[in-house]
Image (spheres, grey):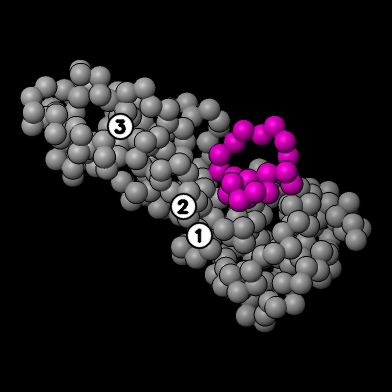
Amino acid sequence: MNMFNGTKINQLLQIWPKGTVATSSWLKKQGISSILKQKYQESQWVESIGYGAVIRKGDKVDWPGALFALQDQLQIDIHVGGKSALELLGYAHFVKFGESVLHLYSHHGKKLPLWFTNHQWGQEVYVHKTKLLCSHEGLTSYQEMAFSITISGAERAFLEMLYLVPQQQDMQECYYLLENLIDLRPVVLQALLEKVSSVKVKRLFFFLADKLNHPWLDSLDKSKISLGSGKRKIVEQGVLDKKYLITVPRELLGND
């Protein structure tokens, strides 16, 4: 490798956070052509993990380093949400043990690159494409080693969990988790609930919140939050809650 290429790789390694993927489009922006990238692979500076993506040779890259590339390099509007975000925020001991699932949320229909979807990241990855919340409200930054990724704050994450009830999320687990979310921020909750597109999510939220009666509940202005009209069937063989007109598990209806 000549001195010019040696300088290039040194410059690249200085701005490329360890533990992350480097995409071809990002490398080109740094002045690394496809030919030069190939030379780096032959010289064992980098190794491919799929078409259009490389990692440092010998580097351990898990899903956070891949998500960083999606968010930061490719500018894809996707984030860690729901139960996965709550686990990162320290609520793992309030959710079911033994699950190895990563929940990602996106409100666009853009396909993710094959290097991401085809790679084995050590856990099953679910990408929920939903317009539940199309704004960036309620998102936060999570520091992972030498880089950060975008995840949902606790308020948004819980609403994203409710969105998956009952097909992919047990409602009773949501109740037990909310029981421990005593420090939710009412200002953030209010803003999110006013923008949530799902009537089901909003009714489920207030049904569970009423039962737990956390201090932040009194600070919410329900008059500004549309709960729709008519009944909503949430669970099979459930019992109708007459206040919010949703069918819920019998165990929850009497769980005070």
**In the rendered image, the vertical position of residue 110 relative to residue 217, given as above or below:** above
* Residue, disc 2: 150
Please provide the residue range marked out in magenta.
84-103
The quarter in which the C terminus is drawn is bottom right
What amino acid is found at the position of numbered circle 1 in the picture?
A: Leu
Q: Position of residue 152 (x, y in %)?
A: 54, 55
Residue type for callout 3: Ala
Quarter holding residue 245:
bottom right
Q: Of 233 and 62, which appears nearest the observer?
A: 62
- Is the Cβ of the residue at disc 2 closer than 8 Å to that at disc 1? yes
Residue 205 picture quarter = bottom right
Disc 2 secondary structure class: strand
Q: What amino acid type should be assigned to the residue bearing mark 2? A: Thr
Of mark 1 and mark 3, the one earlier in the sequence is 3
Residue at 62% across, 33% down: 100
Q: Relative to residue 49, is residue 245 drawn left or right?
A: right
Residue under the point 81% across and 55% down: 248
Q: Which residue is mark 3?
A: 53
Q: CA distance from mark 1 to mark 3?
A: 27 Å
**How many neighbours does mark 2 have within 10 angstroms: few (below 14), some (14-19), or many (20 or more)?**
many
Q: Nearer the viewer, residue 57 or 129?
A: 57
Q: Position of residue 182 (x, y in %)?
A: 74, 63
Which mark is drawn over residue 113? none
Earlier in the chain: of badge 2 and badge 3, it is: 3
Residue 53 on the magenta segment? no
The tally of labels here is: 3
